[in-house]
Image (cartoon, rainbow, N blue to C red):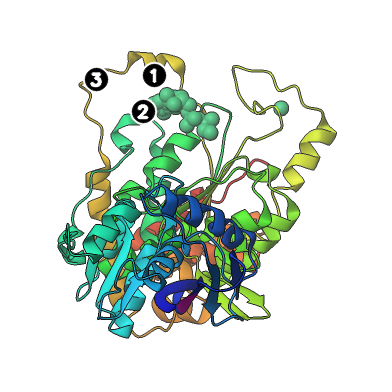
Amino acid sequence: MLAKVCSAANYGLKAIDIDVEVNVALKGFPGFGMVGMANKAVEEARERVRTAIANSDIEFPVAKITVNLAPADLPKEGSRYDLPIAVGILAATGIIKLPEEKSYFYGELSLDGGLRHTKGVFLLAVLAKEKGVKNVFVPRLCANEASVIEGINVYPVDSLKSLISHLENKKVIKALKVVKSEELMGDLKPEFDFCEIIGQEQAKRAMEIAATGGHNIFLMGPPGSGKTMLSRAMPGIMPDLTEKESLEVTKIFSITGNIPAGGSLIRKRSFRSPHHTTSMVGLIGGGSNPKPGEVSLAHRGVLFLDEFPEFGRGSLEALRQPLEDGKVTICRAAGTVTFPAEFVLVAAANPCPCGFMGDPKHECKCGIYQINRYQKKLSGPIMDRIDLHLNVPAVDVNKLMADKENIKREGSREIKKRVVAGRLVQNKRFESADGVFCNADMKNRHIRQFALMTTKANLLLKQAVNKYALSARTYFRLIKVSRTIADLAGSKNIEDVHVAEALQYRIRLHE
Ligand SMILES: Nc1ncnc2c1ncn2[C@@H]1O[C@H](COP(=O)(O)OP(=O)(O)O)[C@@H](O)[C@H]1O
Ligand SMILES: [Mg+2]
Ligand SMILES: [Zn+2]
């Protein structure tokens, strides 16, 4: 007998219909063969399905079983076909009856017949909605991902056994209640609060400017000066994700298996801090069936590259496209895949290999050659795309110790209010400018149109350009940062005070 079960594969950030055809022939030599797939993980599905069925109090049929996943030319990987294959076998042998309405079955089985956390359930739900498929049967652990999509019945399945009872109408699984995505939106408590950071006023101010204008930022300072702390606090001062942004990020998190069990929509801005040894594919994305990398997991949030000079040349080169275009494009024989990757880059580094160059309390043990080599790594294509550069000296231990709990420091919430206001100004300004969302995105022509300076501001900038022999690139960068500072001040035009402040954020040790 033949049964056909519907499921889905993934390509890029899309789910695609897959038919799982199962034929069970009682005549012929018993066996369990699969066609239409290449990946080893699917081969392993055979063992899991066999054992899971046997452990669900059902005798595995002694018959010639053939499974076909169609269309055959689509890459199929992962363990999500376990459930549809098992359901197909049970339907083909007449043990269960498939629902009359089209239904998707999707999920990895464990040997005891339970359903495990499986990647991509959110994308499956999006496909179901698009195709008008009424029911989706998915592991309970990731069913909440699907429950934000309206108009479909999401059945959270604990085990093969419970699914069989449901399909036999013995013990019905209750479909999840739809949780509208707008109900999930709202004010979030910051995970790391700026009020916990003592001193570092200049760095905090620079983080605020970066968050407002979408500027990339570079922090240089000795170990323990609070670079990591400052960076972690950054997502908490950025505006809350909009519903649209949240759905974008959720897709990326779902397909990479980054939504924890029971989780649904991703509402927090990302903070990703890949180690400098992370592979290129891990960082940028890729693979034969391309998957998003860290830059896409940081989409709409913060990408923190600590020990920045330690990152390989190749990785840094590959960061150029996402930094410039806000996306990653991967070409494969099966087609081109694009993953969004719009993030604020926060790069951090020690001033020298030992970390203490310029520190009044510690001696730097590095040789001149070492220092030169190290600092050379700090130039190049990525540095050119960083608008704010600043030194983060360590806060004096005495100051840290003298700190009283009751001293009221400004918290992330207050800072965020200003950032949100500054973003609103930019949204309005760039309504008609294609592809520009914040000041950092401005190209030179936008700068001419949108970043008007007072005469005094102009003069100050000119003087600085001459005095410090600044490059044209630095000149435009300074205007962009000044624009954001002016926005934070609620000023229509850029004034000399704004330029003066922007000038503070371009100083680096080796310049
Ligand atoms: N300005 C500060 N305010 C409060 N704690 C600080 C500050 N600077 C450093 N610390 C403490 O030192 C630790 C190390 O800071 P960290 O951010 O990891 O430094 P870095 O990344 O620059 O090496 C923090 O966990 C924190 O406890
Ligand atoms: Mg650190
Ligand atoms: Zn040193």
For label 2, the SS is: loop
Question: Looking at the rendered structure, which numbered label has been put on residue 400?
Answer: 1
- Say what amino acid the circle numbered 1 marks: Leu
For residue 412, say whether it is visible.
Answer: yes
Mark 2, ligand 1, within 8 Å: the answer is yes
Q: Position of residue 503 (x, y in %)?
A: 51, 53
Q: Nearer the viewer, residue 253 or 33?
A: 33
Mark 1, ligand 1, within 8 Å: the answer is yes
63 shown above or below 316? below
Q: Please tell me whether residue 511 belongs to the stretch shown in magenta.
A: no
Q: Do the CB atoms of the residues marked 2 and 3 lie less than 8 Å apart?
A: no
- Say what amino acid the circle numbered 2 marks: Ile
Residue ID at (29%, 72%): 97
Number of residues whose C-alpha sits closer than 10 Å to that of mark 2, classed few (under 14), some (14–19) or many (20 or more):
some
- Mark 1 and mark 2 lie on one chain; the one further toward the N terminus is 2
Q: Position of residue 101 (x, y in %)?
A: 25, 81
Separation of marks 1 and 3 at Cα, in angstroms: 11 Å
Disc 3 target residue: 405
464 shown above or below 180? above
Residue ID at (63%, 18%): 362
Question: Looking at the rendered structure, which numbered label has been put on residue 198?
Answer: 2
